[in-house]
Structure formats: C-alpha cells, structure tokens
Amino acid sequence: MKTAIYPGTFDPITFGHLDIIERASGMFDKVIVMVARNSAKQPLFNTEERMKMIKEAVKKIKNVTVESYDGLLVEFARKKKATAIVRGLRAISDFEYEFQMALMNRKLANEITTVFLMPHEKYTYLNSSIVREISKMGGDVSGFVPVSVKRALRKKFK
C-alpha cells in the first residue's frame, strides 16, 4: 500500500489545498493530511479547529485521513510507513523553498520521495494568508474555501 503525507499549516484549508489532496488521492492508496503544529507560527485557528475543517472538507474522499504532528516531517512519514511527501507548487516563488526542503528531506530519509503537484491554474494565486486577509476585511471568500471554512472565518472576525 502506497501512503503519502501532505503536510501543511492549512490556516485555513483552501480549494487549492483540496485540489492537491484530490489529485494525490488518485495517485496513492492512502493520503494523510498532516496539520503542522509549528510553535514559530501564530495561526488564526488552533490545531483542532484546522483538523476539524479539513476533515469536513475531505469527508467524501475515502482514502484521506487527517492527523497533526509537531516533529520532523520525515519522522512522521516513517511512523506512517509513507513512501512519499506531497507538496504543492503554485508559482516559481514556491519552488526554491520547496526544492531545498525536498533535498533536506531526501538527505534525512532517502527512502521517502517528495512529489510536487501543481494545483489547477485557477488556484495558483490562492493561499491561506490572502483568504484570511480578505475575510478579515469583510470580503467574500466563497470562491476560495468550503462553506464550513467560510463560516469559521466569519466567526473569527466578528
């Protein structure tokens, strides 16, 4: 069974993330969406809130599960017997950082391959920071996130 890890902060999950998850679910037997708990970041939503939103968004994709972790990504991947780490690339600006991370992960765990997936072109401009900012300013984020995420954002910015 081929398992892939799709790590991220997902603060919040967007249609771009979901596009990557759907693509990965067609390529692997199991996809684990790993919600990163990073003490260096101050997310809008706590880990449990992010996991709940993701679970709601992926509930119809049978081979996708959601977990959280705060250690080295490759250690999590090894624990889960994953063969791949999935990363999304939206633009050239993502590539340099992702390339460096992929090389470092290869150095730490040569048996785990990083797979880069590009979201549909209609999501290449989309990221969680933009969605949070639009929502904070009272803008409509319906075209960027699932309804449950839109509601959660609205509640945060009341």
Image (cartoon, grey):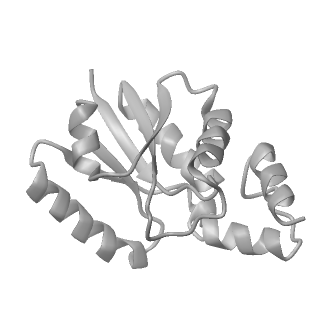
Q: Which one is in front, 134 or 25? A: 134
Q: Residue at x 49, y 30 (%)?
A: 65
Q: Please say if 29 is above or below 52.
A: above
Can residue 94 be seen here? The reply is yes
Can residue 83 be seen here? The reply is no
Q: Residue at x 79, y 58 (%)?
A: 153
Q: Please say if 80 is above or below 139.
A: above
Q: Please say if 78 is above or below 42.
A: above
Q: Quadrant of the C terminus?
A: bottom right
Give x and y (percent) for residue 101.
25, 65
Say which quarter of the image contains residue 39: bottom left
The reply, left or right, for residue 42 in relation to residue 93 is right
Say which quarter of the image contains residue 24: top left
The reply, left or right, for residue 97 in relation to residue 148 is left
Number of numbered discs overlaid on the protein picture: 0
Give x and y (percent) for residue 40.
44, 71
Q: Residue at x 27, y 20 (%)?
A: 1
Give x and y (percent) for residue 140.
86, 64
The reply, left or right, for residue 1 in relation to residue 39 is left
The reply, left or right, for residue 146 in relation to residue 69 is right
Give x and y (percent) for residue 107.
9, 58
The residue sitting at the front extreme is 39
